[in-house]
Amino acid sequence: METRLNLQPGQNGTKALVEKYGERLVCVRYRYDASTATRYKTVELIEETRPWHPAGSRESHLMERAADEPVLLRIGYDEKALRETVRQHGGRWRPEEKAWSSTYGVAKELGLIDRIVGDI
């Protein structure tokens, strides 16, 4: 099957479908099947919409997490006082990741949310 035409909502050939589906309409495609000599008109619709933040994006770190969720924190070698504070709150150095492991609750309490570099 071959797609010959891909139309966006509002273009000629889509107006009746825009009236039918409204904002849910993404595109209209005309597909052709040479073996059966048939033309198909297909529509792509939005079924559901909800917020999503890709893993590793800044927004994903700002989303609320469980306080006991383990996280990795980046703390510089020269930040001795901060390293000691994290250690006193139960943090541990993880040489394989070159980062400190702690919990999200501790990171939030100490104001280190922006230093989260990953999950354990």
Image: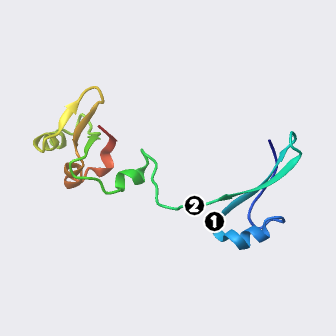
Q: Is residue 60 found left or right of 40 in the rendered image?
A: left
Q: Is residue 97 found left or right of 44 in the rendered image?
A: left
Disc nearer the start of the sequence (1/2): 1
Q: Residue at x 18, y 35 (%)?
A: 92
Of the pair 24 and 115, the residue shown nearer to us: 24
The Cα–Cα distance between marks 1 and 2, rounded to whole angstroms, is: 7 Å
- Total numbered labels: 2
Q: Is residue 67 found left or right of 39 in the rendered image?
A: left
Q: Amino acid at mark 2?
A: Glu
Of the pair 102 and 3, the residue shown nearer to us: 3
**Quadrant of the image containing the C terminus:** top left
Where is 50 relative to 90, above or below?
below
**Quadrant of the image containing the N terminus:** top right
Q: For label 2, count other residues whose C-alpha is less than 10 Å away and answer few (under 14), some (14-19) or many (20+).
A: few
Name, please, the residue furthest toward the top: 96
- The residue beneath circle 1 is 24
Residue 30 in the image: x percent, y percent? 81, 53
Q: Please say if the residues under marks 1 and 2 sit with CB atoms less than 8 Å apart.
A: yes
- The residue beneath circle 2 is 47
Q: Residue at x 27, y 42 (%)?
A: 71
Q: Residue at x 64, y 69 (%)?
A: 23
Name, please, the residue furthest toward the front: 36
Q: Residue at x 60, y 60 (%)?
A: 46
Residue 19 in the image: x percent, y percent? 72, 73
Residue 76 in the image: x percent, y percent? 27, 37
Label 1 element class? helix
Q: For label 1, count other residues whose C-alpha is less than 10 Å away and answer few (under 14), some (14-19) or many (20+).
A: some
Where is 15 relative to 54, above or below?
below
Residue 118 figure quarter:
top left
